Image (cartoon, rainbow, N blue to C red):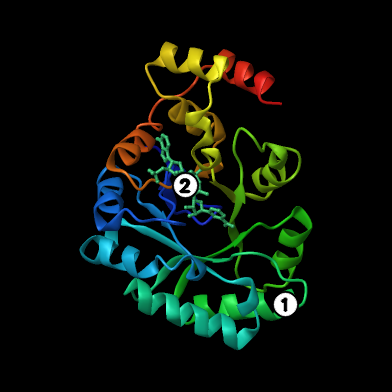
Amino acid sequence: MLQKPLGDSGEMISEIGQGTWDYHGGVESLRLGVTLGATHVDTAEMYGTETTVGKAIKDIRDKVFLATKVSPQHLHQKDVIKAAEGSLKHLDTQVLDLYMIHWPNSNIPIKETMKAMEELVHDGKVKHIGVSNFSVHDMEEAQRAMSSEKIVSNQIQYNLANRSPEVDVIPYCKKEKITVVAYSPLSRGAVSRKKDEVLDKLASKHGKTKAQIALNFLTREEHVVAIPKANSLDHVKENCAASGWRLSKEDIALIDEHFR
Ligand SMILES: NC(=O)c1ccc[n+]([C@@H]2O[C@H](COP(=O)([O-])OP(=O)(O)OC[C@H]3O[C@@H](n4cnc5c(N)ncnc54)[C@H](OP(=O)(O)O)[C@@H]3O)[C@@H](O)[C@H]2O)c1
């Protein structure tokens, strides 16, 4: 499993992680994923999966890069602190490696939220601050609102059916050394279900599956990682093996042209 830098924090994270929205795979699938190197485990207070994640990683906590999110209705100062404490309890851990704002909320001043995020870092409850579903403008505002911390990541929807982040968010993140975490990277499973001549051709050329081709393409840049969700053990294995090799320039150009 290839490791990639987390923003400019100096920390490295796995190129392929594990999402847990609508996750029902119990502790087994997550633990297998960590064993195979998908150590970046993503959850959120909103998903209702923090307790399962906590149980799955209890005795392997030191191997895991643990990421969770505060819900958009909890972005007032006191609510952020309370939500983080709830997540720490559910995840049964002392510290969150990455704490993200799940969605922006224009009704709550961003300054208040980011101050609370910084407070969590200063109190040792959070290591790194991230955002999710933030536009370039949202990221600029959030960064300006902080005095001592840097945003390390932005988790966004990025898949072959939605490459719109390539227009602005992904280049901005590259320039600012912010890691892009691609969610729904398999288009919620559709990428494997649909027939597609280019993906089929590349899959057979590389002896890989369409899901692996898609994940490898999406993570072709140094600052992009992906967090597919897999309930099944076979899918976990398959997703982990999407890393550690690279599509050629010609393959990338073919996909690029085909999925415009
Ligand atoms: N920040 C946000 O607002 C936000 C929003 C959505 C998602 N997310 C995060 O991103 C994660 C992933 O996104 P997602 O769950 O929406 O969709 P996804 O990862 O694109 O797709 C998940 C679906 O793909 C299937 N799958 C997994 N690996 C596969 C493989 N190798 N071959 C074929 N099918 C495969 C899964 O099946 P099985 O489960 O049956 O194995 C599941 O049905 C979420 O779990 C969550 O952590 C964040």
Q: Is residue 192 left or right of residue 256?
A: left
In x, y percent, where is residue 171? 70, 41
Type of the residue with mark 2: Ile
CB under 8 Å between discs 1 and 2: no
Residue 105 x/y as whole percent = 72, 71
User: Count of labels shown?
Assistant: 2
Against 153, is 150 above or below?
A: below
Residue name at image x 38 percent, y 30 percent: 244
**Considering only vertical position in the picture, is 136 above or below 123?**
above
Q: Is 208 placed left or right of 167 in the picture?
A: left
Locate residue 120, reporting x and y percent: 51, 79
> Which element carries disc 2, helix, strand or loop?
loop
Query: How many angstroms separate mark 1 from mark 2 (CA)?
Result: 29 Å
- What residue sits right under mark 1 in the picture? 111
Q: Which mark is residue 224?
A: none
For disc 2, the marked residue is 227
Closer to the camera, 130 or 236? 236
Q: Is residue 124 visible?
A: no
